[in-house]
Image: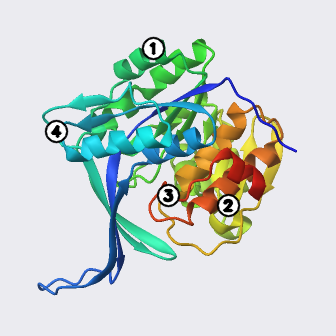
Amino acid sequence: MIDPVTNSTVLVVGDANVDLILQGDIVPRFGQAEQLLDEATLVLGSSAGIMASGLAKLGVETTLLAVIGDDDFGRFTRSELETAGVRTDALLTDAEVPTGISVILSAPGDRAILTLPGTIPLLTADAVRAAVESVRPDHVHFASYFLQPVLAGELPELLSWLRARGIRTSLDTNWDPAQRWGGLAEVLPNLDYLLPNREELRAIAGAVGGAASLPPMDRGDESAAGVIAALGPAVVVKAGADGGWSLGHGAPLASAPGLVVDVVDTTGAGDSFDAGYLAAVAHGVEDESLRLRWAAVAGSLSTLGKGGTAGQPGLRELRAAL
């Protein structure tokens, strides 16, 4: 029986915006062709926002630091976070720039995402330091690295500052829209956990280790994870329907399966995976395979609802599924 107890606090740093999820006939056809959708839903979006929601639902004291606009989308974002149990006193508001929005063209097995960044790129390292001094977290998680170029440029020094204070750190870069994957070689040495999906794993390893250092794809992704882990962080990989696996910190490869479910919407499943893993860390789960099982189950259950947060489990639901 698992009976986790936590006094750990997590500060999630990154983006906060809304998602407009469109389902049905979603492949655009130009020439003024009108297409009829099956459904359109406005929900809490953003990697950091969805992850913070999932973490709070799993019983971890969670604060989100992000910038929102002084507009209806910003107020909606704040309200949805508070409903999920996320502390929003660190949210910053910009009166001149609109809250970001992502339009998600959602199919059962894949999705396309169109994003207006809005306030997302406005976060700075100074704002993170101020939030850390106020919240006093045990762990700081960073999301959407490539949507925040100012913060990304300041992240190596900021991570060093956090490590000097004994604060654990993690990063989910998400996809690089420019596909350059720059700056990460300087970020990884002071990072405790990197949480990529399989495609991001190989792109990051190629960027920091050189494409020549990677084996052919049919030899698997363990070597790619090894390239990254050699720079410092444990690499925790989201493997979709196959669950997840990890490598690093001198530990052998560990893995865990997810659940077989009837998927409603995959939006935010990776962020819920992150929440499950870091919740296990916060709750003091030491067995790596069990941490990965928390992550994979949380990600699986999140696909049972529309949007990134509707299907996220509470701690009791997660324990029952485990």
**Callout 1: helix, strand or loop?**
helix
Task: State the image coordinates of residue 190 (x, y, percent, origin top left).
Answer: 58, 26
Left or right side of 279 for 86: left
The C terminus: image quadrant: bottom right
Find disc 2 in the rendering and name its residue: 215
Element under disc 3: loop
Q: Which amino acid is tagged 2?
A: Pro
- Crowding around mark 1 (Cα neighbors within 10 Å: few <14, some 14 to 19, many 20+) is few
Residue 202, quarter of the rendered image: bottom right
**Which amino acid does the dot numbered 4 rest on?**
Val
Which residue is at the front of the view, 211 or 41? Answer: 41
- Of callouts 2 and 1, the N-terminal one: 1
Towards the viewer: 273 or 173: 273
The answer to whether marks 2 and 1 mark residues whose Cβ atoms lie closer than 8 Å is no
Answer whether labels 1 and 3 touch (C-beta < 8 Å). no
Residue placed under numbered mark 1 in the picture: 134
Q: Residue beneath label 3, please?
A: 310
**Marks 4 and 3, Cα distance to the nearest angstrom?**
28 Å
Task: Identify the residue at image location x=41%, y=72%.
Answer: 106
Q: Nearer the viewer, residue 216 or 100?
A: 100
Question: Which label was assigned to residue 97?
Answer: 4
Mark closer to the chain start, 4 or 1: 4
- Residue depicted at 70% across the width and 28% down the height: 6
- Distance from label 3 to label 2 (Cα)? 39 Å
Query: Quick one: label 4 or label 3, which is nearer the N terminus?
Result: 4
Q: Amino acid at mark 1?
A: Ser
Q: Are marks 3 and 2 in contact (CB under 8 Å)?
A: no
Above-or-below relation of 11 to 27: above
Q: Which residue corresponds to the image point at 35% horizontal and 29% vertical from the top-left?
A: 91
Work out whether residue 165 can be spotted: yes
